[in-house]
Image (cartoon, coloured by chain):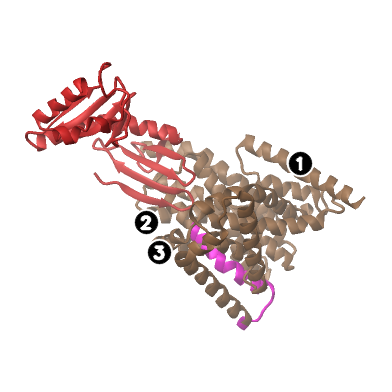
Amino acid sequence: MEIEQTALPGIGLKHEFTTQSGRRIAVVSHRTGRRDLVIYDRSDPDRACEAVQLNDEEADALVELLGAPRIVQRLNALHREVEGLVSLQLPIVDGSPYAGRPMGDARVRTRTGASVVAVVSGGQVHASPAPDFPLGAGDVVVVVGSPESTSAVADILTNG
Amino acid sequence: MHTATLFIELGGIVLALGVLGALALRAGISPIPLYLLAGLAFGQGGILPLATSEDFIAVGAELGVVLLLLTLGLEYNAAELVTSLRGNARGGLVDLVLNAAPGAVAAVLLGWGPVAAVAMAGVTYATSSGITAKVLSDLGWIGNRETPVVLSLLVFEDLTMALYLPILTAILAGVSLLGGAITVAIALATVSVVLLVALRYGRFIEAFVASPNSEVLLLKVMGLALLVAGLAQQLQVSAAVGAFLVGIALSGELAHEARALLIPLRDLFAAVFFVFFGLQTDPKAIWPMAGTAALLALVSMVTKLATGAYAARRAGVARAGQARAGIALIPRGEFNIVIAGLAVAAGAHPDLGPLAAGYVLILAAFGPLAARLLQPLITVVARRA
């Protein structure tokens, strides 16, 4: 997929691409921080038939919504590419010893060799969380590693 | 007593402008034609001639020009200007030739002589980047494929102005061919040096101007702009160009902040500037020129449409987009009045002011309206095709 970047002097930047089904989509980033999500007309592909103005918060929300399933998809793709590698989504259950503690306390990588690639917390995906990321009951930890190491992580997160 | 009359007159004018601005907002048109009409009403031969505030308004108008150009310069950074020049030089030249011609030819046909022809060329050439930017944003055309073409034509025009205004200033001052050539050389050198300095050493100027305090920032930018504008005027390069170059030299977050601070000032003084131009124009002199102004407006609408179509076609945009590019370029406004104002102040032909006023009145009002009315039509035609 090719993303085309165009300068809009005095306004900002435009990034656009064509989807597989032939629709053109663009994001106009204004210097003021405003962003427009632009969808082009089918019959007149030069014309924006919809231009939705987004503020910072709305743009972030859209990114989250579009990005969350993508992370899972990418992980699944990773599986197919690397044999012997699995990813698990492990919930932090209520009685977990790590609920309410920073993720680093579990020392997952040192003890098992598996990696935590994301934590889904309150519907939001936090990719590559730092060791001080606070885990809470109900969060889902996404780990990648060998079948043995990932199940060891599951054990650690439930039983300590 | 004097202060009392001054305040009453100024207050009346500014308040009237506010009311007119609200009307324009409701009607969805540019307020510029209404400000001009207000100036006509207050000025000589108008319904409400002013007694004491003309001197203040004259200085305010000069400040308005400096602020208009400064904020315009702040919108662009040097890198953008250079890229636009490289990519769209041919479209820019077609724009220059096609749209300077109607004004120049009109002045010659009216027998106003070569000096007026140069001034009128500028009056018909420049699209109002302010009104056009508003049209693009209001109609949701910013994402359109022809929009980068339109914007880079505007950039090209603004840069051309940086060279044109000094030439016009020199010609209006009646300097000899040699003197004119020297002025132009100085102007070219100044513009190139400023662009170079802005590209290479912009951060030093920014480091000097930057301040976390908005008051300090405002004073520094405004002071720098006025100082450079004054020096530029001294060198006969035109104060407006000096202010424009200061705007270009500042970029990034700083330019954005400074612009936000200056916009209220600009809005006030730019409105005063349009009123001042109207004040100087006798409304009775506009009627005899109305036919000529309408004809000139019609011709230069066609030439702008052709320019937009040409430039958009070169960028691979389809028919409908070509038409939109042309329509977006139709509005005339602040620059054209700045140019006509310079000519009037230098004592050009007495009919030049009224002609320019009529011309801008038509195109500043009709340009955005045309875009709004034609948009659905273009879409329907594009669907059929």
Q: Main secondary structure of the magenta part?
A: helix
Viewer-closest of A51 and B102? A51
Q: Residue furthest top?
A: A94
Q: Considering the numbered disc 3 on the image, is that residue within a helix, a strand or a loop?
A: helix
**Labels 3, 2: front one:** 3
CA separation in Å, label 1 and label 3: 45 Å
Name the residue: 60% across, 65% down. B241
Name the residue: 30% across, 30% down. A102
Of all chains, the one bearing label 3 is B
Name the residue: 25% across, 29% down. A69
- Identify which amino acid the numbered label 3 is placed on: Arg
Quadrant assignment, res B166: bottom right
Q: Is residue B48 visible?
A: no
Q: Are marks 1 and 2 on the same chain?
A: yes
Whole-percent x, y for residue B330 in the image: 54, 50
Q: Is residue B289 left or right of residue B97?
A: right
- Identify which amino acid the numbered label 1 is placed on: Leu
The part of the chain drawn in magenta is B155-178
Whole-percent x, y for residue B204 in the image: 50, 64
Residue where numbered disc 2 is placed: B314
Give above or below for B259 relative to B205.
above
- Identify which amino acid the numbered label 2 is placed on: Arg
Of all chains, the one bearing label 2 is B
